[in-house]
């Protein structure tokens, strides 16, 4: 195979951006051959501009058409696993928009199908391409930060207006989206949090519904995590604060990392703090350290980077930056956060009872209401700055 024929399912904001990027030949080895959406006006409008691309309203028809080798899925969250499983069973390569779905039970089933498939399975965790997050992960994984003590991530620069939530009938509903800021905006950060610091052993959370907007899901959340080694983590996010903050601090026995304003600051202790604490005869003492400020030496490739990596993986065997099965990790954190909040902010041990989560989510979805939306035309020509890391 010399090139990868791509079909896009869902020509909303995100799918339209992916489709435009590939149609304009911005990804080496990728060729856009088909688009699919239940809204025929969206696909017709796109094909009018790119007449070589075929249009479909039924993804099964597209899968069986012989016109594609791989699919990018960018539909409402509750449909992610369902469509991805159909594609993978047909051994079509799949790149799935985040989150992997809305419940870990569905994603566990998806991962099982993916492992049995001969196809490549990736997920659009585009912020993994950011050089600073990659460097932080490298430092933590190398042991240069020692044993982790604490992480604190304040990421409140996901500001959204009421107009944004009114732009799609599925948005900010339990039945259509399956959650709020933790399911829509923060999956990137939740993924990076566990990618760098590892998975916690328990979650306690406070998820505030409709705090800043007229919606039925949370637009503000605070998560407290505990880890196997005794470390703790705090994650704070919101779509209702302006100006927002994006600051990640990670403390270990050998120093501290702070990622903020496009810079990674690293205090690298010359001696382990735990040893100093145990052996020093002083009530308080200074520990020698080296200080580094690291700025990106290369750009964040974002969505294009994930698309290119996906193509390279299928065509040349390149390792995936974001394997699709990794989608289970961040979703486990957000599902646990919801379950905690629904139960009076009770501590939820991981792994947790997914049946209890599914039962409560189904009840919320049953009482959920699909709303009338403002039809917003896709007239942009690429990726919005709001979808990349902003400091």
Image (spheres, helix red, strand yellow):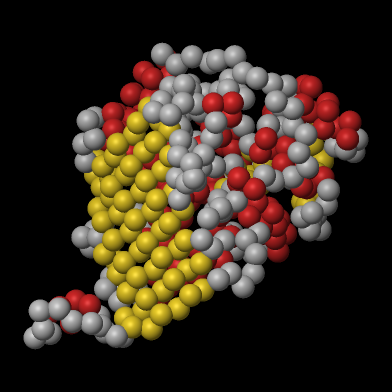
Name the residue nearer the viewer: 143 or 235: 235
Q: Quadrant of residue 275?
A: bottom left
Q: Of residues 357 and 45, which is closer to you in this image? A: 45
Residue 250 at x, y percent in the picture: 35, 64
Residue sitting nearer the eye, 214 or 179: 214
Residue located at (30% from left, 70% from top): 252
How many labels were placed on the picture?
0
Q: Residue at x 62, y 32 (%)?
A: 75
Residue 228 vertical position relative to residue 147 in the rendered view, above or below: above
- Can residue 109 be seen from the camera position used here? no
User: Residue at coordinates 49% horizontally, 45% vertically from top-left?
Assistant: 243
Question: x, y (%) of residue 233?
Answer: 30, 54
Against 284, residue 323 (above or below) is above
- Left or right of 240: which side holds 390? right
Vertically, is 253 above or below 62? Answer: below
- Residue 134, percent across and down? 51, 66
Q: Quadrant of residue 74?
A: top right
The one of 31 and 348 positioned closer to us in this rendering:
348
Query: Residue shown at 69%/54% (left/top)?
Result: 304
On the image, the x and y values in percent for residue 114 come to: 54, 45
| Quadrant for the N terminus in the image | bottom right
Asked whether residue 264 appears in the rendered view, the answer is yes
Left or right of 96: which side holds 285?
Answer: left
């Amino acid at each position: 195979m010399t090139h990868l024929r791509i079909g896009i399912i869902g020509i909303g904001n995100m799918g339209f951006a992916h489709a435009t990027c590939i149609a304009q030949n911005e990804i080496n080895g990728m060729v856009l051959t088909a688009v699919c959406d239940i809204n025929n006006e969206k696909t017709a409008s796109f094909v009018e501009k790119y007449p070589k691309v075929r249009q479909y309203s039924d993804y099964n028809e597209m899968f069986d058409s012989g016109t594609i080798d791989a699919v990018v899925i960018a539909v409402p969250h509750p449909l992610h696993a369902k469509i991805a499983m159909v594609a993978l069973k047909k051994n079509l390569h799949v790149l799935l928009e985040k989150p992997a779905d809305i419940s870990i039970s569905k994603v566990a089933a998806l991962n099982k199908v993916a492992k049995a498939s001969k196809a490549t399975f990736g997920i659009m965790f585009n912020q993994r391409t950011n050089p600073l997050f990659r460097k932080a992960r490298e430092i933590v994984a190398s042991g240069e930060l020692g044993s982790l003590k604490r992480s604190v991530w304040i990421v409140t620069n996901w500001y959204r207006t009421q107009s944004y939530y009114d732009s799609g009938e599925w948005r900010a509903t339990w039945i259509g989206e399956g959650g709020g800021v933790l399911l829509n905006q923060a999956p990137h950060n939740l993924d990076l949090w566990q990618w760098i610091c590892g998975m916690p052993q328990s979650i306690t959370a406070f998820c505030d519904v409709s705090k800043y907007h007229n919606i039925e899901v949370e637009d503000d959340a605070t998560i407290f995590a505990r880890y196997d080694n005794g470390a703790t983590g705090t994650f704070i996010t919101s779509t209702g604060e302006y100006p927002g903050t994006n600051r990640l601090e990670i403390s270990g026995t050998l120093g501290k990392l702070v990622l903020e304003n496009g810079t990674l600051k690293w205090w690298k202790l010359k001696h382990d703090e735990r040893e100093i604490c145990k052996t020093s005869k002083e009530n308080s003492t200074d520990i020698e350290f080296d200080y580094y400020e690291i700025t990106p030496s290369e750009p964040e490739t974002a969505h294009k980077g994930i698309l290119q990596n996906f193509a390279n993986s299928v065509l040349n065997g390149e390792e995936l930056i974001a394997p699709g099965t990794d989608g289970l990790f961040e979703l486990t954190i957000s599902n646990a956060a919801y379950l905690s909040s629904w139960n009076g902010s009770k501590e939820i041990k991981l792994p947790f009872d997914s049946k209890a989560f599914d039962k409560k989510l189904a009840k919320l979805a049953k009482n959920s209401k699909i709303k009338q939306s403002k039809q917003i035309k896709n007239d942009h020509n690429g990726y919005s700055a709001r979808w990349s890391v902003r400091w």
